[in-house]
Image (tube, helix red, strand yellow):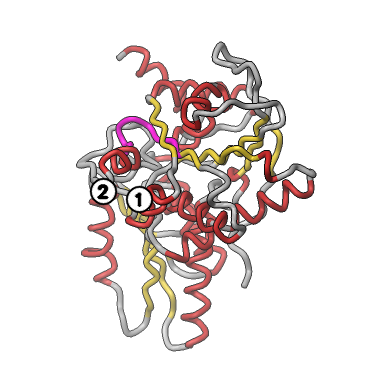
Amino acid sequence: MKSAFVKTPLLAHYFAASSNRLPNQPQFMLKCEFLQPSGSFKSRGIGYMITKQAIKIRSEGNKLPHVFASSGGNAGLAAATTSRALSIPCSVVVPESTSNRMVQKIWNLGAEVHVYGRNWKEADKFLKESIISGHNPSRTQVIYAHPFDHPLIWEGHSSIVDEIIDSLKEQKIDLKNIKAIVCSVGGGGLYNGIIEGLSRHKLVHKIPIIGVESKGCEVFNSSLKLGKLTEFEDITSIATSIGTNSISKKTLENALRYHTKSVVLTDQEIISTCLRFADETNIIPEPACGAALHLGYYPDILYQALNSDFTPEDVIIMIGCGGSATSYNDLASLFSKKILQ
């Protein structure tokens, strides 16, 4: 099966000094998912699921596969990217909060794009009730690409752990020195994949995960506090490409079982980090990605989350999840608006 994603490098990254540095600063390693075909980690899970299902449909030989995806942006772009590579039709519904930049990117890949609803939940309902229902079932077979809640998506995302372990071995870094993996959390697809990958390597009880969200879409944090699934009526954060109204049931089960740590940041903190990272690297992270990167600049947050001291030999894995929704000018404009509020 031709892979819908590529192996990305795990690189030592030196976050610029801040006033919140620890006496014994850990090392940081950045998993560069912005190099994926769609520009984000979504190529792993979404791409893997679509590819596997498309091959099955084609092998049966009776119908033609057609991808239908709902998304805040990056999952839809990953679906369109994979569909283009497989030469199969793709229809994507995004909410009104999705940037014109992202809508154009999806359309440029040949996908049919619809903009509907205030949030992903409303866009997904429209996809199911108005778009999928209109296809010809006698000729086409539906591949429904949920942005995060499907076992094949988690399986695809779990490959990120395989690659991290391979890279650490190549760089002769002992797994015992890995103190945490930091990732942004939306609906929980990437998080579930990391848990699955760590479980496969018998590391799930040894390496904690810190999930980071933006205030206004912190449904993961809220669900953890309540010990049950919760749902937000609306997303008020700027991190619209990753923000969802709810997390998957599997995400909450994993988080409670493995005592996952949760961090919530303000939009202003995240935008500042995105601009800082872009200035230092010439890589433009969107806010959903910047949430995880923020902890590299402020390791005292790591200390508080893990309740643990660090040594210079300790290593923190940062998932640079990528994203294609935001330009540098967008970030600068968002920062100005937040400052004026």
Is residue 329 visible in this depiction of the protein? no
Q: The residue under label 1 is which amino acid type?
A: Leu
Q: Image check: 1 left or right of 89? A: right
Foreground pick, 53 / 192: 192
Q: The residue under label 2 is which amino acid type?
A: Lys
Residue 228: assigned label: 2
Picture coordinates of residue 337, whole percent (x, y): 35, 18
Picture coordinates of residue 269, whole percent (x, y): 44, 22
Q: Which residue lies at the image location 36% right of the left edge and 18% below the top edge?
A: 338
Which quadrant of the figure has residue 244? top left
For numbered disc 2, what is the local secondary structure? loop
CB of mark 2 within 8 Å of CB of mark 1? yes
Q: Which residue lies at the image location 30% right of the left edge and 46% below the top edge?
A: 95
The C terminus lies in quadrant:
top left
Whichever of labels 2 and 1 marks the residue nearer the N terminus, that label is 2
Q: Image check: 324 left or right of 335? A: right
Which quadrant of the figure has residue 135? bottom left
Determine which residue is flagged by label 1. Answer: 252
Q: Image check: 114 left or right of 37? A: left
Q: Which residue lies at the image location 50% right of the left edge and 64% below the top edge?
A: 83
Work out whether 106 lies above or below 179.
below
- Highlighted magenta segment, given as a residue range: 211-218
